[in-house]
Image (cartoon, helix red, strand yellow):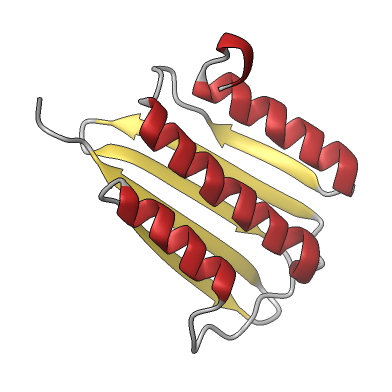
Amino acid sequence: MRGGQSFAEALDSHLAEWSQRTGIAVEVWALPRSDVPPTIAGSVMAVVEEALLNVERHSRAGTVSIAVTVGASGLRLTVSDDGGGFAVPHERRGIARMRARMAEVGGTLSVNSVQGEGTTVSAAVPRRPR
């Protein structure tokens, strides 16, 4: 993360900058209280950036909601928008990139989208035993 920032600080800063640049409101529901290992943080940040790029380019959303939690089972990320949604019959490049970033850290990614109702990108990285 930039200049010694924690993952939560870096993510919060990125979201504020993105919202100001795009004019799309961002609601942050949860950010991790503990720091996230750098490898996982990099992959999660890449997923957030790709999801936001898709919102900016395609969704016509007015609001994006973000939640990142870290618990006993691992890290969970949810990025939801209130945009136009899309049919998810095939893998798009952006989705494939997000899925690949999660696979690099042993995580999973799912996309749920309904035309006219928005899109939710969910990612999970399980906690590894020590």
Q: Where is residue 129 in the image (x, y as percent from the top left)?
A: 10, 31
Find residue 122 and report its horizontal and vertical position in percent.
44, 56
| Point 54% across, 23% down: residue | 8
Residue 76 as seen in the image, left or right of residue 85: left
- Relative to 95, is 65 above or below? above
Locate the C terminus and report the quarter of the image it occupies: top left
For image coordinates 59% across by 79% down, the residue present is 114
Q: Residue 46, relative to residue 71: is it above or below?
A: below
For residue 63, side relative to residue 126 (left or right) = right
**Observer-nearest residue: 48 or 28?**
48
The residue drawn where x is 63% and y is 35% is 28
| Image coordinates for residue 38, horizontal then vertical, percent | 40, 27
Quarter of the image with the N terminus is top right
Identify which residue, 54 or 60, lies in the foreground.
Answer: 54
In this rendering, the answer to whether 82 lies above or below 89 is: above
Residue drawn 21% across and 36% down?
A: 127
Quadrant of residue 21 within the rendered picture: top right
Q: Where is residue 26 in the image (x, y as percent from the top left)?
A: 73, 42
